[in-house]
Image (cartoon, rainbow, N blue to C red):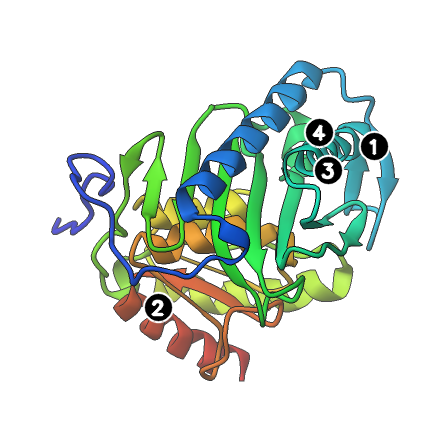
Amino acid sequence: MNDQRSEPHARGATEPVRHEAATFPDGTDAQSLMTLCEELARAAGDHVRARTGDHGGVAATKSSVNDVVTAVDTEVETLLRERIAAARPDDGVLGEEDGVVAGTSGLTWVVDPIDGTVNFLYGIPSYAVSVAVVAGGADPLRWTVLAGCVHAVAGGTTWTAGLGRGAWRDGEPLTVRPAVPLGQALVGTGFGYTVAQRTREAAVVARMLPQVRDIRRIGSAAIDLCLVADGRLDAYYETGLNPWDMAAGSLVVTEAGGTMTGLGGAPASPAMTVAAAPALAAELVAALELVIA
């Protein structure tokens, strides 16, 4: 069998993908912001790890009974907000649980205390803390992600990226896997929480599955995006992502040389997010446009 997959490109890589140097507001730079993102994500991960098995169950629900929040989600977001305020008091913060607090510096931190809460609740080891810092406010269609970190709590894997600095997994530089044909691609996806969303998404999966090698539903969009960046997924698509789901992971993808896009030439957004090496992203977008039309 001719299998074009190989080991993830973090292994044996020597240099990260390089991009044009970015201009950072407020006298900051990519390296210092990337370092702070990682420090915050690891501290939050330590708290989550300490509460594993003692999370107290579901504390609240949001869009449906399946869209759950635990006490640990709120504890971790509070921890992140407090540490950001101590380190950078003039910056804004946008978080999944407590919304947006505007700042005056031009920078906003975008945090997801536990991306993959259902996995955390059930003890499935695919959940992460996601921390990013952006310029341009709290609108993902207008902001520029400057630095980000996704910390997979259970396994300890940590992905980081800085604009113009490349992407990294546990200190090793990343480059996305060269594009394979769509029919040989392992594709990640995710599902929403309402019956209407899941009905639409199931119909798309049913039509996409015969066109790809296989489909994985891991349960954390942040991890999915990072797996594209480090070559353990060929591609990923999902509708309904929130800004905090994708802020850090999107930069990991693009700094590793991948593409983040939507359908019909639109940028990645809640309407559709696609991540892959550029040629595969184009092929996946074309297939999704036919399926969804």
Above or below residue 259? Residue 16 is above
Picture residue at 66% right of the left edge, 23% below the top: 48
Query: Which mark identifies residue 281?
Result: 2
Above or below residue 283? Residue 237 is above
Residue 220 visible in this rendered orientation of the protein: no
Question: Which numbered mark, 3 or 1, is in the foreground of this view?
Answer: 3
Q: Residues within 10 Å of mark 3 (few under 14, many from 20)?
A: many
Q: Residues within 10 Å of mark 4 (few under 14, many from 20)?
A: many
Query: Which mark identifies residue 81?
Result: 3
Residue that badge 4 annotates: 121
Question: Looking at the image, which is closer to me, 71 or 286?
Answer: 71
Which of the two discs, 4 and 3, labels the residue nearer the N terminus? 3
Q: For numbered disc 4, what is the local secondary structure? A: helix
Q: Position of residue 97 (x, y in %)?
A: 78, 45
Picture residue at 22% right of the left edge, 60% below the top: 180
What's the amino acid at mark 1? Val
User: Marks 1 and 2, how far apart in space?
Assistant: 37 Å
Question: Looking at the image, which is closer to me, 50 or 58?
Answer: 50
Contact, mark 4 vs mark 1 (Cβ under 8 Å): yes
Q: Position of residue 283 (x, y in %)?
A: 32, 73
Contact, mark 3 vs mark 1 (Cβ under 8 Å): no
Q: Residue furthest front?
A: 27
Question: Looking at the image, which is closer to me, 62 or 98?
Answer: 98
Residue that badge 1 annotates: 58
Query: Which mark identifies residue 112?
Result: none
User: Marks 3 and 1, how far apart in space?
Assistant: 22 Å
Q: Position of residue 56 (x, y in %)?
A: 82, 22
Picture residue at 53% right of the left edge, 46% below the top: 222
Q: For numbered disc 3, what is the local secondary structure? A: helix
Left or right: where 218 falls relative to 66: left
Residue 271 visible in this rendered orientation of the protein: yes
